[in-house]
Image (cartoon, rainbow, N blue to C red):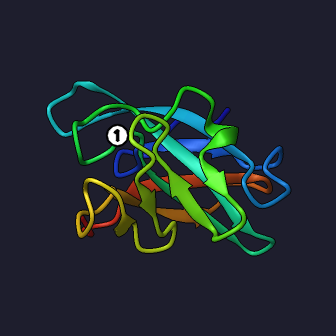
């Protein structure tokens, strides 16, 4: 795996994420140097999204199995603890105890080589 550029949170292998709902966790360092965990998720054939793996309701992980976070019936990310539902593209909670709050979204950029993506802070939520 290539080294992570200084402005990137992580470089993640996206090749195993082929179908909508396929996802994986990735580790990163937050702004204070603490450890964080993110999720890279395939929404559709052309869209990968990444976000911090914590529900804004209580700050608990969204779920231990990232492959179970996506509900294809309404294309939502679902928190396994409280069943809150989030739009994967915007991160907005549209149903549940944290309605109106957002997941912390990250920017996903293709590269540095085929099948790898660079995850960066987006400046959004």
Q: Quadrant of residue 52?
A: top left
Dot 1: element: loop
Q: In the image, is 97 to the left or to the right of 110?
A: left
Quarter of the image with the N terminus is top right
Residue 9 x/y as whole percent: 40, 44
* Residue found at x 72% / y 63%: 72
Residue 83 x/y as whole percent: 45, 47
* Residue found at x 57% / y 43%: 11
- 42 or 75, nearer to the observer: 75
- 116 or 87, nearer to the observer: 87
Position of residue 94 relative to residue 40, above or below, is below
- 77 or 22, nearer to the observer: 77
Q: Quadrant of residue 106?
A: bottom left
Position of residue 110 relative to residue 9, above or below, is below
Q: In the image, is 123 to the left or to the right of 63?
A: left
* Residue found at x 72% / y 54%: 21
Residue 65 x/y as whole percent: 63, 30
Position of residue 35 relative to residue 87, above or below, is above
Residue 4 x/y as whole percent: 49, 39
Q: Residue furthest left?
A: 32
Neighbour tally class for label 1: few under 14, some 14-19, many 20 plus, Cα within 10 Å: some
Q: Which residue has dot 1 on it?
A: 54
- 64 or 24, nearer to the observer: 64
Q: How many marks?
A: 1
Q: Quadrant of residue 94?
A: bottom left
* Residue found at x 45% / y 40%: 38
């Amino acid at each position: 795996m290539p080294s992570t550029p200084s402005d990137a949170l992580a470089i993640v292998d996206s090749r195993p994420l082929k179908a909508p709902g396929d996802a994986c966790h990735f580790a990163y360092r937050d702004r204070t140097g603490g450890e964080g965990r993110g999720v890279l998720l395939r929404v559709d054939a052309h869209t990968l999204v990444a976000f911090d793996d914590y529900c804004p309701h209580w700050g608990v992980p969204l779920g231990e199995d990232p492959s179970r976070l996506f509900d294809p019936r309404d294309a939502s990310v679902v928190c396994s603890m409280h069943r809150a539902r989030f739009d994967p593209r915007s991160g907005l909670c549209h149903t549940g105890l944290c309605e109106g709050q957002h997941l912390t979204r990250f920017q996903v950029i293709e590269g540095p080589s085929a099948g790898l993506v660079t995850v960066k802070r987006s400046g959004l939520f």
